Amino acid sequence: MEKPPILLLAPLPDFLMEPLLAANVCHDYFRAADKEALLAEVGSQIRGIAMSGGSVAPVALLERLPALEIISVFGVGYDGAPVDWCREHGVRVTNTPDVLTDDVADTAVALVLMTSRNLAMANRFLHAGSWTQGPFPLAHALRGKLAGIVGLGRIGKAIAQRLEAHGMRIAYHGRSRQAVAWDFFESLADMAREADFLIAACPGGAATKHLINREVLEALGAEGTLINIARGSVVDETALVAALQAGVIRGAGLDVFENEPQIPTELMECRHAVLLPHIGSATHETRRAMAGLVVENLAAHFAGRPLPTAVC
Ligand code: NAP
């Protein structure tokens, strides 16, 4: 079989590029100096796209790929792919669920611990030599506190299980009640009012844009902490900075940002914000497993086999 031509919309790691290059003819749209020239040359032949969870496949681009059959996303979040358009146009979309769940849940728990116990600050305190002048201020315990999870999916459930092991109580908010023992809140603001930690683990995209806004942050309140490992778009970052600056909430632990990797200076300067550079799934083991799914989905599609992890 002739190797199918595919377009790359993001920089991808070597351990993904090697098998992609072996099985496909790869055209690097992301790095192309003249994207128009690339499209004019190969646009009509492109049968597949490989992209990262954080990259975007605009409809305007897809409309110029008449032979497009499949988009394989290197990530579980596929908010960068226009799924409704793909469904309408018979373009399949795949993602990389499950293999990253544990790592992302671990990252959320790390942010809960870092914010509750001020661990990043404690580390800086010691390195600055401040310990010799006195002890580090007391922090807050997790036992008995309520974690309100926004989006109780694969990752949300894994976070809940971990935090239960820390003695926390669990509640969740989503579009529907699930068959679990944890308390369901139909209203996000009501859950935020009860919660000590509000943890975003839902998908990004238009449906959840700024779901966590000023009203929700005010409900979370001065003893509450926001954790976001979902997508930057889920939180109104301007409202979050204002809430942190004014002490409307106690703190925030963030792995994702609205305009990453650009972080507003005002957010960088917030003492009670622990900020991570979108590393939720960033381990050798998990990223290799994700790469395997990207390759397998493309290979299955081009061989006419069922897709291992199809979104649509
Ligand atoms: P999942 O299993 O599909 O879970 C998503 C959950 O969100 C579902 O339980 C869903 O429940 C809920 N949800 C959907 N729309 C919602 C809405 N409008 N309001 C509230 N809840 C809503 O997905 P997953 O595998 O757990 O991944 C979740 C997200 O984590 C991904 O989409 C991605 O954006 C993010 N993520 C981040 C990283 C990172 O590196 N930080 C890594 C991987 C994933 P209902 O259907 O009942 O609403």
Image (cartoon, rainbow, N blue to C red):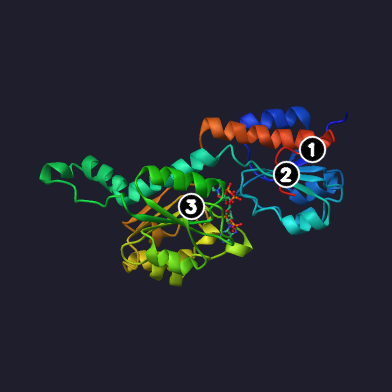
- Identify the element where label 3 is drawn: loop
Whole-number angstrom distance, CA of label 2 to CA of label 1: 9 Å
- On the image, the x and y values in percent for residue 63 come to 81, 56
The residue where tag 2 is placed is 310
155 left or right, relative to 62: left
Three-letter code, disc 3: Ala
Q: Left or right: where does residue 280 sit relative to residue 27?
A: left
Residue designated by label 3: 181
| Image vertical order of residue 299 relative to residue 163, above or below | above
Residue at screen point 27% across, 42% down: 123
Q: Nearer the viewer, residue 75 or 271?
A: 75
The type of residue carrying mark 1 is: Pro
Which numbered disc flags the more N-terminal residue, 2 or 3? 3
Q: Which residue extends farthest bottom?
A: 215
In the image, what residue occupies the spot 30% across and 45% down? 119
Mark 1 lies on residue? 306
Residue 180 screen position, x and y as percent = 52, 51
Type of the residue with mark 2 = Ala
Q: Quadrant of residue 214?
A: bottom left
Image coordinates for residue 216, horizontal then vertical, percent: 44, 68
